[in-house]
Image (tube, rainbow, N blue to C red):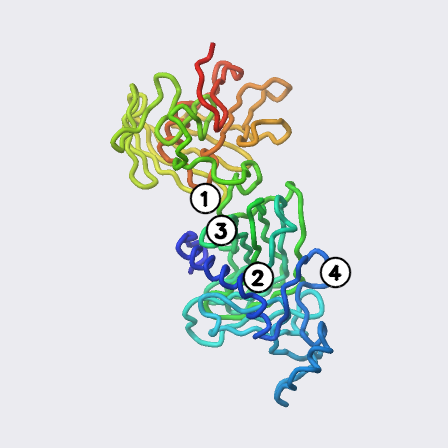
Amino acid sequence: MRPGQPLHRAAAAAAGSLLLALALGVCGVARAQGGGPVPADPRAQQKPLYQPAAAQAPAQQQQQQQPPETVEEVPTPSSKVAVMPPGWFLAGLAPHHYEVTLDAQSACEGSRAAHVRSKVDQPAGYGTFMQIFRADDYRGKRVRYSAVVRTKNVQGWAGLFMRVDGRDAAHPLAFDNMQTRALVGDTPCQRHEVVLDVPRQANFIALGLMLSGTGDAWVGGVRFDVVDSSVASTDLLGGVLGSGAFVVDGPANLGFQPDVTEDQATGRVGGVWFNRVRVENGQRGARLKDGVWHGVFTDMKVNGRTVEGTFDKREGRFTVSREGQVTRVLGTWGKYPVDIRMGPDRLDMRWGERERTLTRTKTETVDPNCVRYVRSDGGLSRIDQLDVCGEALVPVPPVAQLVIALLANGFERPARVDSIFAPNVGEPHQERR
């Protein structure tokens, strides 16, 4: 996989299935390669997350069969020891094409580094030096995995990775492998980090170093700690959701719950609410019928992540995509281009020369399913406000509903910011009296 290449869900699902298999038999895998059981609580360790087996369990090693004379038993400052540290193992799509040694000479930080290298000229996949442990102690928290990494002649890419899995490992709850900031070629010793939120339904956390292609990578100075919301999430799947703004026990109705009626909101942008078959905002609303969204001023059809048709008497075509933590809507409406970017910290809406820019406020108490973006006049007066809620925040939102709701809110501030009325997510719509 090349650096910058979009994350394919099929690849993530395959990796998830592998991690689930490893989770069910991780101790056996670790012991088979010279390791021991996974530590129950990495936070309790004051030393690096990995240590050579000779340092951690000398009594146990004495009982084991002595290695051949050609293999050194005790690491020295100038040695490289081909032994898997307890709690860690080699995995990936082609683990047999890679090897791990403990290097006490080339460590960037601490007394030793794990050295991951390719053994063949053309590896048929990638290798991961990793561990996996239960998420019980970290549910509902934000965690940071960091390490000092150095690379040499990496023809492909390398990076730290961390992933959070629930019951279905084919669909990770959170994931980052530094793909958007990949390490390529020769890179000096530098600390890198991956930060993820651990939802309440999480079962396992996996972390490590990934090497794709040929080359060498050294990792050391490994740390794992709990951080607060001031440390930004790097989740490639979560975006605003990964920032903790929209964390619930399960999906917020993706259109498959039979108890959701046509009058119940599953998402909202400002005063425009929607669900699987309806977008409601007075005359600018629309309903789904025979695969087309129809309304007095709406006639739009979805093709994948693209929406095209007529809204408010103007022809338009829009594509909804995900760029890191930002949901982006690009297209043309009437004669002018549209560019909308909705991220964890701000919302930018542009249509031709019209522009609406708002900043997320984190100090106000809002619906837990919502993010509030505001704009003030520089003093205490608020001149613009927009709440984005529910399915409008998820990494893969319903494209037609999101586009219609954003267009209906307009690209200029409303005359009054206190005139917004719409049902909360999950509540039925009732006429205002």
Quarter assignment of residue 231: top right
Cα separation between marks 2 and 4: 18 Å
**From the viewer's perspective, is the residue at label 2 or at label 1 nearer?**
2
Q: Earlier in the sequence, mark 4 or mark 1?
A: 4
Q: Secondary structure at mark 1?
A: strand
Q: Earlier in the sequence, mark 1 or mark 3?
A: 3
**Labels in figure, total:** 4
Q: Secondary structure at mark 3?
A: loop
Residue 175 lies, with reference to residue 391, above or below; the image says below
Disc number placed over residue 208 in the picture, else none: 2
Q: Which residue of the protein is positioned furthest toward the front in this rendering?
A: 259
Instruction: Pick the residue in front: 334 or 233.
Output: 233
Q: Secondary structure at mark 4?
A: loop
Cα separation between marks 4 and 1: 37 Å
Disc number placed over residue 172 in the picture, else none: 3
Residue 217 lies, with reference to residue 305, above or below; the image says below
User: Label 1: which residue?
Assistant: 323
| Amino acid bearing label 4 | Gln
Q: Earlier in the sequence, mark 2 or mark 3?
A: 3
Q: Earlier in the sequence, mark 2 or mark 4?
A: 4
